[in-house]
């Protein structure tokens, strides 16, 4: 199926990485605990999130909803957006077009 987009890919990934970073325990995707995550420099954390965002973007092409820590990322093809949920609330909507 694939995620359809018309925005610059790097801009989508940047927005998605920032949104994923707002999920309190998103570091669990890297099999880290809170202490391991907080020991990383902020630049390292940002690089981890960009890599995760890239992986999630492609994963959403075959599975429209993915879990990350206590949150989820959902592809809404009808509205051309990605929805980032944390604790059952939509916290970010990322435009794809």
Image (tube, grey):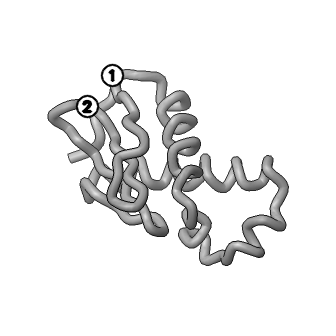
The answer to whether residue 87 is above or below residue 35 is above
* Callout 2 touching callout 1 (CB < 8 Å): yes
The answer to whether residue 66 is above or below residue 47 is below
Image quarter of the C terminus: top left
Q: Residue at x 70, y 48 (%)?
A: 46
Q: Position of residue 25 (x, y in %)?
A: 56, 66
Q: Residue at x 67, y 77 (%)?
A: 33
The answer to whether residue 40 is above or below residue 85 is below
Q: CA distance from mark 2 to mark 1?
A: 7 Å
The residue to which callout 2 is attached is 80
Residue in the foreground of this view, choosing between 35 and 44: 35
Task: Place residue 92 in its image quadrant.
Answer: top left
Q: Residue at x 61, y 66 (%)?
A: 27
Label 1: few (<14), some (14–19) or many (≥20) C-alpha neighbours in 10 Å: few
Q: Position of residue 67 (x, y in %)?
A: 38, 65
Q: Position of residue 16 (x, y in %)?
A: 49, 41
The residue to which callout 1 is attached is 97
Q: Tell me if 11 is positioned left or right of 41 in this view.
A: left
């Amino acid at each position: 199926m694939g995620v359809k987009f018309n925005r610059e890919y790097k801009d989508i990934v940047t927005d998605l990485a920032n949104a994923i970073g707002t999920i309190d325990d998103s570091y669990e995707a890297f099999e880290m605990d809170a202490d391991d995550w907080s020991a990383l420099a902020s630049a390292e954390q940002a690089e981890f999130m960009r890599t995760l965002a890239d992986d999630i973007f492609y994963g959403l092409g075959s599975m429209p909803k993915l879990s990350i820590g206590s949150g989820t990322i959902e592809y809404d093809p009808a509205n051309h957006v990605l929805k980032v949920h944390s604790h059952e609330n939509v916290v970010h909507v990322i435009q794809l077009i």
